[in-house]
Amino acid sequence: MYSSGMFARLAFAVAINVEPDILIVDEALSVGDAAFQAKCFNKFKELREQGVTILFVTHSTDLVIKYCQTAILLNEGVKLKNGECKETIEEYRKLIVNTARKDTELIEKKQIKDTSSKTSFYNNLKEKLNLNPNPVIYGTLEAEIIDFGIINNEGIVTHQIYHNEEYILQLTVKFNEAIIDPIFAYSIKSVEGLELTDGDVEDKILEIVKSHDDFTDVLQEINNWAVMYHLTPMRLNLLEWYEFDRNKTLLEIGGGCGAFTGMFAEKLEQVKVVELSRRRSEIIYQRHNKYDNLEILVGNLNDMEIKQQFDYVTLIGVLEYAGKFTE
């Protein structure tokens, strides 16, 4: 019996070894592990350089952005869009939320909203930014983000984001209808349109760890890099080889979303985790609450009186912002 991943490997291996003029890949790469997928996409690049036409069928918008030159959007056998990848993906996103509107209707509604919302009360942060003159707007218009800005640590509105710096995302939202418990989200993308992160990624991770013990199927289907990063077992390769003493204790400073916590709990007698974020602490708990030898502490290390001596202390992923945890 072959698993779906083994079938995918076999089919792809056969296809690429017959020197095709046109290679059609229909969702085959949604199965298999990350290493297999990486090999496949490296082969994609080789074939493309050789002039092979590749027809890649997928629901992963990130893969389309990264590997394709043009994109076609099909719905129930009807071609809705054929063109540049970013534009086609925006049409796809409209389609999946079922809120597509005619452009003329959106423009008329937006003009009405803008004239009523520009008052002296708002800071007009967006006027300080170079905005896209043709934004893609869709939704029910029950609420609107009418002003926004990214503010750096000097209090200046900016459109440039640098590694290891802190920023404030400020929004002004107009509610046209009563909404209970609204959620505000954002995404950060590369110039090519590849999604690097989004504002509700930890909500997605929490939902997954609450409902799954094994993330294999989830990782095969999801196209969000941030979620994959936090949940992939491949990160364990950093430390899984190390021979911990089973009778020792460990302090994990900065547990994140628990990528290593479960492994530590399996290998050691006692594990104590310190995590600043309450949301991430909840993710760790939901992910690893089966371990009786695990304790999770929420807060800053400076504010805690931990008198216990530990045999191991880890700072994985914390060194770049260690000042937040301790002086």
Image (cartoon, rainbow, N blue to C red):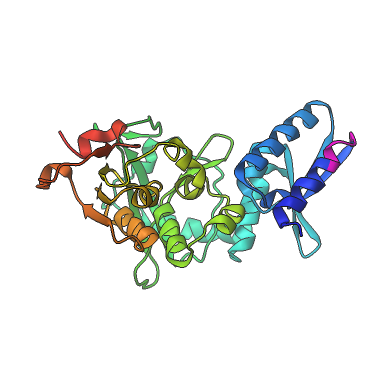
Q: What residue sits 57% from the left and 55% below the top?
A: 216
Quadrant position of residue 53: top right
Q: Nearer the viewer, residue 218 or 136?
A: 218
Q: Is residue 82 visible?
A: no
The residue at the far top in this view is 49
Q: What residue sits 20% from the left and 41% below the top?
A: 310
Residue 288 position, x and y percent, is 37, 58
Q: What residue sits 61% from the left and 51% below the top?
A: 90
- Please indicate whether residue 36 sits to the left or right of residue 191 in the image: right
- Please indicate whether residue 120 sits to the left or right of residue 60 in the image: left
- Please indicate whether residue 250 sits to the left or right of residue 23 in the image: left
Q: Is residue 70 visible?
A: yes
Looking at the image, residue 43 lies above or below residue 269: above
Of the 4 image quadrants, the one containing the N terminus is bottom right
Of the 4 image quadrants, the one containing the C terminus is top left
Q: Nearer the viewer, residue 42 or 10?
A: 10
Looking at the image, residue 83 lies above or below residue 45: below
Q: Nearer the viewer, residue 154 or 196?
A: 196
Q: Nearer the viewer, residue 154 or 220?
A: 220
Looking at the image, residue 24 lies above or below residue 44: below
Residue 308 position, x and y percent, is 13, 46
Please state the total of marks drawn on the protein image. Answer: 0
Q: What residue sits 37% from the left and 62% below the top?
A: 286
Residue 129 position, x and y percent, is 41, 36
Q: Is residue 15 in the magenta section?
A: yes
Residues in magenta?
A: 14-19
Looking at the image, residue 145 lies above or below residue 97: above
